[in-house]
């Protein structure tokens, strides 16, 4: 692992839609691996492997930046997702337990670009009632449909 | 305003469901009025003036506590909402621009309990695309109904 004047820069990445404790756990685990945590927040246009984000990118980055555990958050690059990683030169890149990146392919691409970062796959957090954006959306849809089934006060 | 060894304690209160920049703005404005920000997070059972929270209280307090601007967050009292205020003895209590408390009645009740806090009603934040829990829920319901109207890939 390359050291920067005694300071280890950790990079975490993600969409961070509907911020929840699962995100927090991932970011806190990441921060604990070094001295500084920088976060790349995915642009709306780049989220293609799962439903489009509910919360727009500017609002997502604002919320991530507001967390105690985060030193800085930047938006991803729309065309080349490795460009901000080259600029940030992290010592460690963390992957959440459920992130879809292939760690081996990622390491290969980093190597071809001369980025000497360690890639660390983090563990799953303890169960938590609404620790995924999908679960939060599902609960909202479920509660709303219950509201619609319930007779109105006048009926 | 009563001073505590040169340190001004500000108290903010709210439900903080589906944390968004409107909450952040309210908390940052509150923190700017003093030296320490304590937040009372409403219990699920006590949210009666608006739809019940999507996010359970333990998860809401965890997210509020994770914000840079917040020194400490505590759950409200289920029976007597003034009890934690008596314990915390804040110098300033802030009300968000859209919070349903009547500032005059609140000051009267504080006075009868010997709580010498200034009550400050804060200004509305700049418009922001999804800066209320209601708007976030509405967007989720709208997007889901669009998904349902869209023909399936096979049809």
Image (spheres, coloured by chain):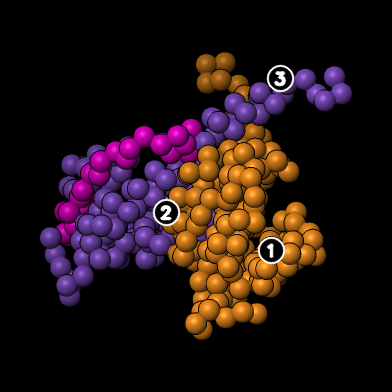
Chain colours: A purple, B orange
Which mark is first along the chain, 3 or 2? 2
Residue displayed at 64% across by 33% down: B141
Which x, y percent locates residue B46? 64, 43
Same subunit, tags 3 and 1: no
Is disc 1 placed on a helix, strand or loop? Answer: loop
- The numbered disc on residue A26 is none
The residue carrying mark 2 is A41
Residue at the spot of label 3: A149
Q: Residue furthest top?
A: B155
Residue A64 percent coordinates (x, y): 45, 57
* Position of the N terminus of chain A by quadrant: bottom left
In the figure, A121 relative to B124: above or below?
above
Task: Please state which of the two labelled residues, at mark 1 or mark 2, is closer to the viewer.
Answer: 1
Q: Residue at 60% of width from left, 62% of height from top?
A: B86
Residue B113 circle label: 1
- Above or below A140: residue B65: below
User: Left or right: A148 with respect to B11?
Assistant: right
Please rate how many residues cluster around mark 3, counting C-alpha atoms within 10 Å: few if below 14, some from 14 to 19, many from 20.
few
Chain hosting mark 2: A
C-alpha span from label 2 to label 3: 38 Å
SS assignment at label 3: helix
Vertical comparison of B7 with B112: above or below: below
Q: CA separation, marks 3 and 1? A: 44 Å
Q: Residue at x 77, y 65 (%)?
A: B108
* Front-lying residue, A11 or B82: B82
* Chain of the residue on which disc 3 is drawn: A
- Determine if the magenta segment contains residue A120: yes
| Residue B26 x %, y % | 62, 63
Q: Quadrant of the C terminus of chain A?
A: top right
């Amino acid at each position: 692992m390359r050291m920067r004047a005694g300071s280890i820069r950790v990079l975490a990445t993600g969409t961070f839609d509907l911020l929840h404790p699962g995100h927090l756990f991932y970011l806190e685990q990441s921060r604990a691996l070094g001295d500084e945590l920088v976060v790349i927040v995915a642009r709306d246009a780049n989220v293609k492997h799962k439903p489009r984000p509910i919360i727009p990118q500017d609002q997502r980055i604002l919320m991530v930046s507001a967390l105690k555990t985060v030193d800085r958050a930047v938006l991803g690059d729309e065309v080349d997702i490795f460009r901000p990683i080259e600029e940030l030169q992290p010592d460690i890149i963390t992957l959440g337990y459920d992130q879809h990146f292939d760690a081996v392919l990622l390491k290969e691409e980093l190597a071809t670009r001369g980025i000497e970062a360690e890639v660390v796959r983090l563990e799953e957090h303890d169960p938590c009632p609404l620790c995924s954006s999908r679960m939060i959306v599902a609960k909202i849809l479920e509660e709303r449909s219950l509201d619609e089934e319930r007779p109105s006060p006048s009926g």
